[in-house]
């Protein structure tokens, strides 16, 4: 049996995370810290997808199908409802779907067609309007901010030497006409990831905004501080810092960002600044790792999450939900579940679900709701 002990409650100042320290590994049983359930997503020939969860809420589940540039809508039990698939060159279509935001309250979907254009649809795919603006947004850095605005993050321009020109990257976008407003936060520099050496550098656009438990965080890996963005005052409040300073770090160092918050943990990425290239010209990153900061005892661990229902579950990344507090999802591929079923490794609800799967079915969604 896997067990996780209770930690003593402890308050502390703003956490400072040393990204160079080798922290101990800690095995954490998901069922000890969270309620775990499973949702099999409908599988039919015309709705099989390769993609990721874009919205998970009490009102439904939305999958962004990266391969077909479509949105698939399921109810909260996994039953397929409808799709938005309007890729094309017409005035009511999008040429690409880089990202999509679902506003359940307004019953609208915002499809990021490019870095400067958004196409707006109703939940059933009916065209409503286009929003255009003279900016270059990071399409994956966008969230619903308020009834009237989206929030996003713009990539800056560079001088003749390739250096970033200081600018105000956090922007609010009107949902009705695309009018822009910038926050006072200034970005002065950035740090690329290198492949092999400084002579082979590439600029990877890590997410710079994160929405967790209904709040937005400025999560720029080029700074030493992660900020909470106050929705009422639009002020930035420091909530975590890193050391050593990113400005002093070298190629062997790490960039840091926040990807999850629960009552007990801050979930962090330590992203290696240097990677290598394999024989197929694919970037290989063997140094990056995850960490958790325990908010109760102030300690930091490299977590190894285990699942009593699926002991052989490979290391998988949890995607934290924007709409439901302290909740994350994990996609479990059908073929992996069938292999484990045949090996006698599954139990409980997950075993029952797997017994009804075919190898090419859509994934089963594992829902992890962390306890208070």
Image (cartoon, rainbow, N blue to C red):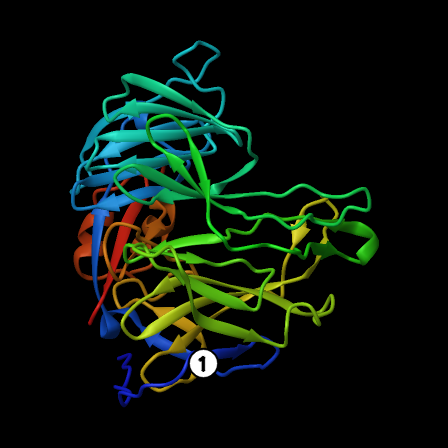
Q: Is residue 287 left or right of residue 121?
A: right
Q: Is residue 314 left or right of residue 195?
A: left
| 80 up-or-down from 321: above or below | above
- The residue at 48%/33% (across/down) is 98
- Residue 196 visible in the picture: yes
Q: In this view, does 189 lie to the left or right of 323?
A: right
Percent position (x, y) of residue 194? 73, 56
Percent position (x, y) of residue 11? 32, 86
Mark 1 residue element: strand
Quadrant of the image occupied by residue 159 = top right
Q: How many labels does the image show?
A: 1
Percent position (x, y) of residue 297? 35, 87
Quadrant of the image occupied by residue 143 = top left
Give the residue pinned by disc 1: 300
| 94 up-or-down from 275: above or below | above
Q: Which residue lies furthest to the top in this view?
A: 90
- Of the 4 image quadrants, the one containing the N terminus is bottom left
- The residue at 34%/43% (across/down) is 53
Percent position (x, y) of residue 145? 33, 45
- Residue 361 visible in the picture: no
- The residue at 38%/33% (across/down) is 49
Quadrant of the image occupied by residue 18 = bottom right
| 67 up-or-down from 270: above or below | above
Crowd band around label 1 with a 10 angstrom C-alpha radius: few (<14), some (14–19), many (20+): many
- Of the 4 image quadrants, the one containing the C terminus is bottom left
- The residue at 49%/20% (across/down) is 95
Nearer the observer, 23 or 354: 23
């Amino acid at each position: 049996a896997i067990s996780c002990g209770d930690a003593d409650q402890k308050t502390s100042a703003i956490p400072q995370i040393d990204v160079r320290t080798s922290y101990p590994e800690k095995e954490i049983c998901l069922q000890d810290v969270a309620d775990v359930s499973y949702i099999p997503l409908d599988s039919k020939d015309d709705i099989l997808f390769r993609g990721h969860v874009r919205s998970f809420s009490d009102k439904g589940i939305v999958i962004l199908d990266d391969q077909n540039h479509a949105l698939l809508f399921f109810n909260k039990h996994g039953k397929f409802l409808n799709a938005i698939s309007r890729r094309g060159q017409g005035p009511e279509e999008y040429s690409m779907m880089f990202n999509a935001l679902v506003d359940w309250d307004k019953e609208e979907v915002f499809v990021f067609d490019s870095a400067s254009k958004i196409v707006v649809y109703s939940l059933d795919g009916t065209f409503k309007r286009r929003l255009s603006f003279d900016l270059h947004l990071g399409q994956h850095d966008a969230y619903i901010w308020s009834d009237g605005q989206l929030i996003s993050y713009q990539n800056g321009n560079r001088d003749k030497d390739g250096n970033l020109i200081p600018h105000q990257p956090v922007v609010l976008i009107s949902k009705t006409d695309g009018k822009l407003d910038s926050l006072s936060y200034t970005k002065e520099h950035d740090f690329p990831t290198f492949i092999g050496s400084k002579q082979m550098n590439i600029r990877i656009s890590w997410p710079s905004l994160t929405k967790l438990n209904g709040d937005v965080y400025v999560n720029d890996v080029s700074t030493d501080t992660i900020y909470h963005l106050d929705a009422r005052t639009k002020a930035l409040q420091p909530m975590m810092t890193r050391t050593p300073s990113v400005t002093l770090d070298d190629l062997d160092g790490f960039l840091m960002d926040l990807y999850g918050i629960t009552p007990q943990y801050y979930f962090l990425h330590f992203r290696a600044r240097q990677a290598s290239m394999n024989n197929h010209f694919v970037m290989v990153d063997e140094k990056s790792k995850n960490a958790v900061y325990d908010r109760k005892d102030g300690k930091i661990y490299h977590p190894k999450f285990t699942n009593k229902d699926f002991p052989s579950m490979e290391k998988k990344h949890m995607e934290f939900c924007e709409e439901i507090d302290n909740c994350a999802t994990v996609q479990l591929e059908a073929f992996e579940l069938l292999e484990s079923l045949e090996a006698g490794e599954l139990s409980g609800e997950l075993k029952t679900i797997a017994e009804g799967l075919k190898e090419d079915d859509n994934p089963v969604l594992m829902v992890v709701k962390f306890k208070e």
